Image (cartoon, grey):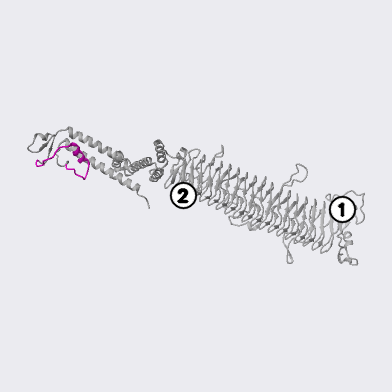
Amino acid sequence: MASGQAGPVERELPPLNPFDGVPDARYHVPAADLLRPLLEPGSGGLLRWRRQASNAPIVPVENAYITGRLDLRGADLDCLFRFENCRFEHAPDVREAKLLGLVFRRCWLPGLKARNLRSRNDVRLIRSVVQPGGVVDGETAVQRGDTRERGVPDAAINLTDAVIEGSLVLTRTRIASSFGRALQADRLQISGALLAYRLKADGQVRVPGMRTGGNVNFSGATLHNPAGFALDANGVHIGGSLLCDVDNFGAAGKRQAFTARGVLHLPSARVDGDIVFRGADLASPQRGVIASEAWDSSDPYVDPWPSVVADRMRVEGNVEFSDGLSAVGTLRMMNVRIGGTLRLARARIKVSRGDIEPFYDRALHLDGSEIEGDFEATGLHVPCGQLRLSDVRVGGNMLAARANLKHRGRDVFSARRMKIAGNLMLTNATLEGTLRLQGTEVGGSIELYGTEVTAPTERPQASYSVDLRTVRVGRNISLTKSREREFHASGGVNMDGASAARRVDLTGAALEAESVAEHGIALDASDVTCDEFLLNPGKPPQGRILLRHAYCRTLDDNDEFWAAEGGIELEDFRYDVLHRPIPMQNDRAVDTRIRQLRSAMAGYRPGPYDQLATMLRASGNEEHADTVLFRKQQYRYEALAQGYRVLGPGVRLWSWLQRWMVGYGYRPVRALGWLIGLLVVGSLYFWLGQDSCVTDPVRFMVAGTRCAIDQQETGLQWNPVLYTADLLVPIVDFGNKGRWYMHGLDKWMSDGFIAMGWILATTVAAGASRMIRRDTPTK
């Protein structure tokens, strides 16, 4: 076809620039002249289309301004229409048409009406501009009976229910719709791909229910509809991948990222390949009118201002929001299933901070999703917003090294009941807010090497920086240093009820309880179970430590741990061995251990001493076990004396007697020593002394230096040793103490030895009973 007419090409005319406005008359070609050769002879004005020969001719039109209406509605033509450097007065109309193909290259169109189009090849708009005018011709994008959808006039390009057996190509095309929708393609079916490299669309790109056999590629495209959906792809099925990547084609330095202003709406989408948003720039308004009335709800789990909505999406490959992606607004993908890896590496996501509950300030919302591969968020940066991953299942590892997440005073990373088959690695990360992993199950390890967690959730009774309550870990929980960077939890760590098959490691950790935490707990490890418990913080914890009902096989600790400012709760804390055993000859080590226990606990608690003694006895260290129990009884009586007040001095005296005579039953040699000592003293006293009664043989029977009470007693012989032994041994009578006359000082001395004997016997009995209770096995 000719420039300016339907005849031979006029070579003297320069090429038409279709974007400079209406050209002069030399370029005008009436649409009727283009269509006349395609009409059957004698059809008159009925526009009965001529069926074409099987050689499938091409209808080329170049450098022309098409005047009038190009009306191919309902046509059945084996023709491929190719327009190049053309401008149209009216929107081409190919509704219900059956064509071989349709190509617009470097064309300017006021619209394209293509509802129910059937194309056996590609439909292409390449480097074109589609810019509807201000006049609405009355056709709406969607009609309900005989009424038009209010407020929704023509879309700039309307491909609703079209079938394209090739590909739809929109490369470098600009669609500037003043009507609200740039492209409407509900239920569009494409056998090939949708290629929209560097597409620029002002208005909504609407493709719900679309089916493609190949990729949907928006790399380098710009979609602009900030008041609503920039892309509405509800329920699409993409046979290849959805690519919203950086377009690198062209001269050096001409890289162009995918950009969207408005919501990307992808619920129930199904993608047989990957979804790629590498380096994309996504943003939606964070205040004001929301894109969907359904989101105007009191539901606390709604995200009113998202940048991406992809609930119930199914992806067979990977999903990548990574490598420089910037998103303002929630990435919402609830209940999705991803067959490969979810990547957020080096992405930046930001939302506006909510003022009142439920806040609606989630940066990432993945509740209930399943990821068969890894979850990779290395270098993820969230300057404001929460990552919510409740009930998420990850088939591989969760990798979030060097992440920078900020949501001060609230949960910044909330992953309750998450299940991870591999490792959770949040190493060298910086978090402001609470890291909440309550009920999480990890097949490998939880590794927080060098991670800093500050500004926790502000709650009176549960203000912790790291919440690991009831987690289940197949290997290790590591909250340790990474080279020069320490693990730091300014609001403390709560791992109540956690279990690790191997190790819980806090080597080099810095644990604090901020003033916002009224409970003042730096570490709550109650009910923790593990094989090894390494409690070696880098500095004394600033707050209390709770180890109630915890159990480990091997315990390792250091002086900084025992110097915790708030003390340590050790009730029913059980361990089998120490990582660094106490040698039998090292009395100083056991004394240090006892001193640490006493200084760490507020008041007397018998359980920790019993546990230490049990551990020592199990390792064969009976002597040190007795030392621990000896000191336990000493502290017990001190506590009793403080409690009784009035009777306190008596309790202290009784404690002193037991301690020095029999060592509370744990030093039986002392009893023998006291017995021998008293026997020697008494024997010497009664041997060296002489009673004045020996000068009165009339009243007494004299036997050496002492007198028998009964003169009829014959055969008695004075023996100071046997007499002293009879005085010291209560209950049993050896026949001496009641038969010899004592008076004055001797009487006081003999009564004193009797009293000492009873005291010695009582303390021995008390100690023996204590030892029997100690040695009786529990059933």
For the N terminus, give its image quadrant. Answer: bottom right
* Nearer to us in this view, 708 or 719: 719
Left or right: 347, with 639 as reference point: right
Res 433 quadrant in image = top right
Q: Position of residue 723 (x, y in %)?
A: 18, 39
Mark 1 vs mark 2, CA separation in Å = 81 Å
Label annotation for residue 672: none
Left or right: 694, with 369 as reference point: left
Q: Position of residue 217 (x, y in %)?
A: 73, 52
What SS does tag 2 mark? loop
Left or right: 497, with 215 as reference point: left
Is 455 included in the stretch rendered in magenta?
no
Among the two numbered marks 1 and 2 on one chain, the one whose residue lies closer to the N terminus: 1
Q: Main secondary structure of the magenta part?
A: loop
What SS does tag 1 mark? strand
Q: Residue furthest front?
A: 715
Q: Is residue 652 visible?
A: no
Residue type indicated by callout 1: Glu
Label annotation for residue 527: 2
Magenta part of the chain: 711-735
Res 661 quadrant in image = top left
* Nearer to us in this view, 731 or 240: 731
Q: Position of residue 391 (x, y in %)?
A: 57, 54
Label 2 CA crowd tier, 10 Å (few <14, some 14–19, many 20+): many
Residue for badge 1 = 62
Mark 1 or 2: in front is 2
- Looking at the picture, does residue 597 appear above or below residue 140? above
